[in-house]
Image (cartoon, rainbow, N blue to C red):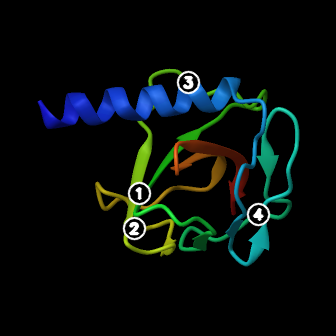
Amino acid sequence: MKRLLLFFIISAAFAYALFASDSLPFPVSLGGQAAKDGTPFAKVQNPVTADAELAVESKGDMIIVNVNPVTAKNEPVPGSTPAVLLLQGKTKTNIDKTMDGKKLPAGNYIMSVVSEGKTASILFTIK
């Protein structure tokens, strides 16, 4: 039941991220690179490692991060399950610290960072 609730929260956050008008409502960096605001998504310019540090400049007590693999058209891969990272009482973590403990393989991803009632949507690549 908890997994189902978490899945719906993740899905809602991702859906909201797709339609949000501001792709970067707060600063986010990945692997030492600041995400650059863009339309419809912000982007981390250069590929990062699978254990890159994620830093979110937010005052929220809980930061939820959903990471979905994307196709060449930046659309979620059908049938894929998002990786989830929770930052509780902190603003930094490594992207290999997913809730399921699995490292993200090389590829293209969209990351939805939810904090303070806002969502940052960021495209990035793992090398």
Q: Amino acid at mark 2?
A: Lys
* Mark closer to the chain start, 2 or 3: 3
**Marker disc for residue 56:** none
Identify which residue, 63 or 50, lies in the foreground.
63
Circles 2, 4 touching at the beta carbon (< 8 Å): no
Location of residue 15 in the rendering, given as x and y in whole percent from the top left corner: 56, 24
| Left or right: 48, with 84 as reference point | right
Q: Which residue is mark 2?
A: 97
Looking at the image, which residue is at 52% across and 43% down? 117
Determine the residue located farthest toward the left in the rendered image: 1
| Left or right: 108, with 37 as reference point | left
| Left or right: 114, with 46 as reference point | left
Location of residue 66 in the rendering, given as x and y in whole percent from the top left corner: 48, 45
* Mark closer to the chain start, 1 or 4: 4
Q: Which one is closest to the eye, mark 2 or mark 4?
A: 2
Q: Which residue is mark 3?
A: 15
Q: CA distance from mark 1 to mark 2?
A: 7 Å
Compared with residue 96, is residue 85 higher up or lower down, i.e. above or below?
above
Q: Secondary structure at mark 4?
A: loop
Q: Amino acid at mark 3?
A: Ala
Circles 1, 4 touching at the beta carbon (< 8 Å): no
Q: Which one is closest to the eye, mark 4 or mark 3?
A: 3
Q: Amino acid at mark 1?
A: Leu
Q: Secondary structure at mark 1?
A: strand
Q: Residues within 10 Å of mark 3 (few under 14, many from 20)?
A: few
How many circles with numbers are drawn on the protein? Answer: 4
Q: CA distance from mark 2 to mark 3?
A: 23 Å
**Marker disc for residue 85:** 1
